[in-house]
Amino acid sequence: MKLAGKAKMLRMYFGENDKWKDKPLYRVIVEKCRELDIAGATVLRGIAGYGASTLIHRSHVFSLSPESPVMVSIVDSEEKLQKLLPFLDQVVDQGLIAMSDVEVIKYVHQPTSK
């Protein structure tokens, strides 16, 4: 079965070593998404990137900056993502959060009845 519709995508960019209360920030965000019953969240580690500091972050053993860039991508309705934003205000010290409109195509596998 294929379902389609409009949704919002929220993407956050920060460093792999960013923490909140001694836990990796990306893990804290994913756990909060699950608690809020948000459809899904994915954490991706980047090869290289930079932000406001213009310091290039690389995931290379010999890099001067051992911190890899991280992106957390979340897709759900605008209403659900709006419930997440106050929490992000608390836990994200520095980074970038971007929200955009997306068209969702979801494939759902239903068991066949015999």
Image (cartoon, rainbow, N blue to C red):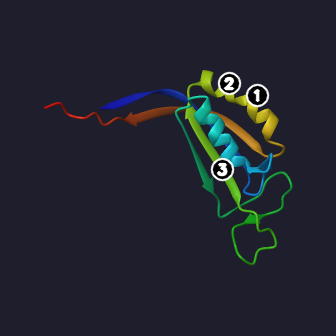
Q: CA distance from mark 1 to mark 3?
A: 19 Å
Pick out the residue farthest to the top.
79
Residue 34 location, quadrant: top right
Residue 61: give x, y in percent of width and height.
71, 76
Q: Which mark is residue 3?
A: none
Q: Is 81 situated above or below 11?
A: above
Mark 2: amino acid: Lys
Q: Which residue is mark 3?
A: 71
**Disc assigned to residue 83:** 2
- 113 to the left or right of 14: left
Q: Is residue 73 left or right of residue 50?
A: left
Cβ atoms at labels 2 and 1 below 8 Å apart: yes
Above or below, 1 relative to 21: above
Residue placed under numbered mark 1 in the picture: 86
x and y percent of residue 58 in the render? 72, 67
Badge 1 amino acid: Pro
